[in-house]
Amino acid sequence: MTAAAGEQSGARTRKPTARQLGSIVCAILFFVTFTLGVTSIWTRMTVFDSARFAERAERVLDSQAVRSKLADEITDAIINTGPSNLASFRTIIRSTLDPILQTPAFRSIFRRALDTSHDYLFTQSGNTQVINLSESLNVLSGSLQATNPDLATSIPTGTNELLVKIGDQTRGLGLWRIAERLTLAGAGLLLAAGLFAFGTIALGTNRHRSTFALGISAAFSGIVMFVLATIAPIIAGSYANDPDTQRAFVSATEFFVSDYRLYSIWIVGIGVVLCAFGTATAPNGEVVTVRSVIDRLRSAIDRHKPTSQRGQIVHAILLMVIGFIIVIERETVIPLLVIVVGAVLAYVGASQLLSIVGRRSTVTTRSAVLSDVKEVQLNNPTMRVALMVAALLITIGAGAWFTTSDARSQTAANEQRKCNGFSELCDKPLNEVAFLGAHNAMSTAADPGWLFYEQTKSIPAQLDFGVRALLVKTHYGIPTTVNITGANAVITDSIAELAVNPIDQDDQYSNEQQAKAKELQANIKVDPNLRDVYLCHVYCEYGATKFTTALGYTRQFLNDNPDNVIIWFIGDYVSKADTEKALREAKVFDRVWDYDPTAPMPTLGEMIDAKKNIVMISEFSG
């Protein structure tokens, strides 16, 4: 007993060889490079990629805390921007916003706003300093139109209010430089991690211990990633100035890093299996139990327990501090303790499972493997251990694959091209695609001056809700300074129209209404030099929208949503030359598809690729 104890003591005090030190250093470097590599790649793919960032960030709207805080911010911005009477309707506006923030239309607006802000933060040429949600005001106005029309007209739908500002200090961080570095850093770090993993095994004089050390490094890497994913929401919440904002920040960050946290758990699992493999294949190794692990931990603590009075005082103070931290930050510490305890239990279980099929002899693993390679017998114990480890790793890999399938499918769906909202339409010819249309799309209650309207939402809101065919009528109109219908009246220039196309007729207007319109034409003095092209329903006196303004809505929508094709079906009571002039002034002429009746009908994808994704169909001019 004494001799054996002396030999063991001597073995413990024996200095490690250069190879052993090299193996330990490689294991530590593997831990560092693997952790940084996985984190870099995840950051590059989810934070610095604008489409994935916007899509992932859009998911934070699933959080009630985020929606509540965002609704508060939008309400304050509307009241600060609009007329003073809006303050009396705060409760109505706020309650109306709650369901709007859950609609696909708002999520689309929110995603575009985030995409714009991403360009500002993460590209060198970005120049936008805000997250602009002003488009959502059109959706709000449309929703209020049915319940409170007077309030709806007060909503400042034309504002460009910047709701979330990103200061110059943030811009000055030069985050685009980090993005460029991370492009190659992640792959390089993972390559280095692979080399260090090989070095850990190759340099170790005891392959079992080297494998165990590599497993410990992998497990610690997963635990560190888990800690990062756990404290990230807490750090984000610390920047809030009030409890509501804190809850929103914490909830949003938790949504954002959810898959990173899941990856960390699976990495811990891989490390546990490697540790169990190193333990189970050791010759004459004892069966691992929970009690033996606890005994080893207790023995390690006893060996490092301080003996001096000063050391004991420091040790006691550290225990008190750790205890207070656990109590104060229990919501953070408990998940960490759970994953550590779970990893230990998984290690014990995996070790026992592998021990059942493993060897328990004095034959070294190296000679056994060489012998097994020669014999290639599946009933060989080492082969059974290897097969069991492979089965466990495959199970872990399959679990990681399936548990992250939603995130991958969502990413694949984002990366898959969609034309007018559906990938199936990209290869469809134009004449085989159905377009959601709006008749008299310009005639809307959301725009002032329309006495008789057929739509409750403006053209931008119609586009946001999926309308892709706008049926309108163009007329010659002359603006005046006379306010009749809530906006300055526009007088129809019937004489100019008669010179180019038949006079528009519509039985929807009564004889009295038609007579009144003609009376206004005769009695209001106008300047013919101010004549322009307007969208009107027979009589511009009962409502008019300048054609170039409406075309501008289309230009802006296609700039934000380039994978769409929009049809303008125009009942044109103006000349072809004036129509073309308006298209050029609105800067959309170059985006109009040049139709060739002798050529095959283009597909939506071809039109989008050619940036000719506006179709103009004329009733009279051709």
Image: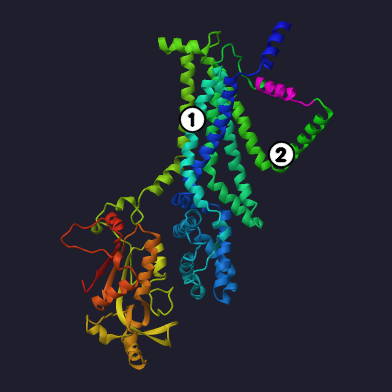
Place of residue 114 in the rendered image (x, y in percent of width and height, measured from the top left): 49, 57
Query: Mark 2 or mark 1, which is nearer the start of the sequence?
Result: 1
Residue 312 in the image: state x and y as whole percent: 81, 30
Asked if residue 613 is positioned above or below residue 187 in the image, the reply reads below
Q: Residue at x 57, y 71 (%)?
A: 79
Does the stretch in magenta take in 296?
Answer: yes
Q: Which mark is residue 194?
A: 1
Amino acid found under the numbered disc labelled 2: Ile
Residue underneath mark 2? 326
- The figure's colour scheme reads rainbow
Q: Indicate the amino acid at tag 1.
A: Gly
Circle 2 crowding by C-alpha within 10 Å: few under 14, some 14–19, many from 20? some
Residue at the outermost left position: 598
Asked if labels 2 and 1 touch by Cβ distance under 8 angstroms, the answer is: no
Element marked by disc 1: helix
Give the x, y percent position of residue 321.
76, 38
Q: What residue range appears in magenta?
A: 292-306
Q: Where the N terminus falls, by quadrant?
A: top right
SS majority, magenta = helix
- In the structure shown, which secondary structural element does the residue marked by tag 2 occupy? helix
Which residue appears at 59% of the width and 20% of the height?
Answer: 18
Residue 554 lies, in percent from the top left, at 36, 66
**Residue 180 has which mark?**
none
Q: Between 571 and 456, which is closer to the camera in this rendering?
A: 571
Q: In the orientation shown, which residue stands out farthest toward the right?
A: 309
